[in-house]
Amino acid sequence: MTVVSTPIAMADTNPATVPLTKIGDAVEDGGGTTDPATAYHSAWAPGGAGSGIVLGVYGTNRYVHNARITYEPGTSYGTSDTCVDLFAISYYDNGKRHVRTAGRQCGSGLTSQNFRIRRNLDQGSPFCARIRIGNEWSNRACVTIKRTV
């Protein structure tokens, strides 16, 4: 998998690509994070200064087991419950774009949503996530599905 940076819209784009390094059965994101076949990417999100989302995609090569979106509220961390109104992911399977969503969720501090995928996704396709708080969407966090062996 490869980390990409993309604009706010969920429409498909041709994002710039920063390759991950294959380390045996693990990948490295360039920031020193190494996990078994995992790719991470973060993006801006509404909230206090430093707010953002982190997308974690877990799998091997084109097979994605699951993905997790975590919302980090920045300077508002710990001041009250953290709520996300909508979590959204998009990915490609057999040439068809799939969008999945999960509704409102609140928690103390960080708020996360896990999506089970359990399938081989299209080679070279984007896997993206974003959240909505009120009427404001976060930027997309994306990784590119890519066979690395």
Image (cartoon, rainbow, N blue to C red):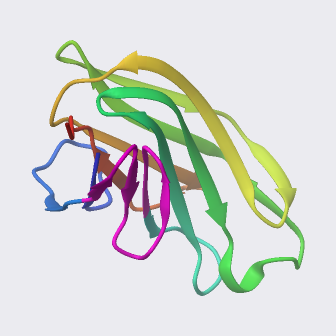
* Nearer-the-camera pick, 144 or 105: 144
Taking depth in this image into account, of 6 and 46 the one nearest to the observer is 6
Total labels: the figure holds 0
Q: Is residue 67 above or below residue 93?
A: below
Residue 74 inside the magenta-drawn segment? no
Residue pushed farthest top?
94
Residue at 17% across, 29% down:
123
Residue lying at 43% horizontally and 67% vertically, measured from the top left: 43
Q: In this view of the protein, which residue sits in the foreground, 134 or 86?
A: 86
Image: 94 above or below 102: above
Image coords of residue 103 (percent x, y):
68, 35
| In the foreground, 98 or 117 | 117
* Rendered position, 94 above or below 134: above
- The quarter of the displayed image where residue 97 is located: top left
The answer to if 25 sits in the magenta stretch is yes
Q: Indicate the position of residue 69 as horizontal and vertical percent values.
A: 57, 49
Say whether residue 117 is left or right of residue 145. right
Q: Which residues are magenta?
A: 20-41
Give coordinates of residue 72: x percent, y percent.
66, 68
* Left or right for 108, reference 136: right
**Residue 140 visible within the image:** no
Residue at the location (57% across, 83% down)?
50
Question: Looking at the rendering, in which quadrant would you find the C terminus?
Answer: top left
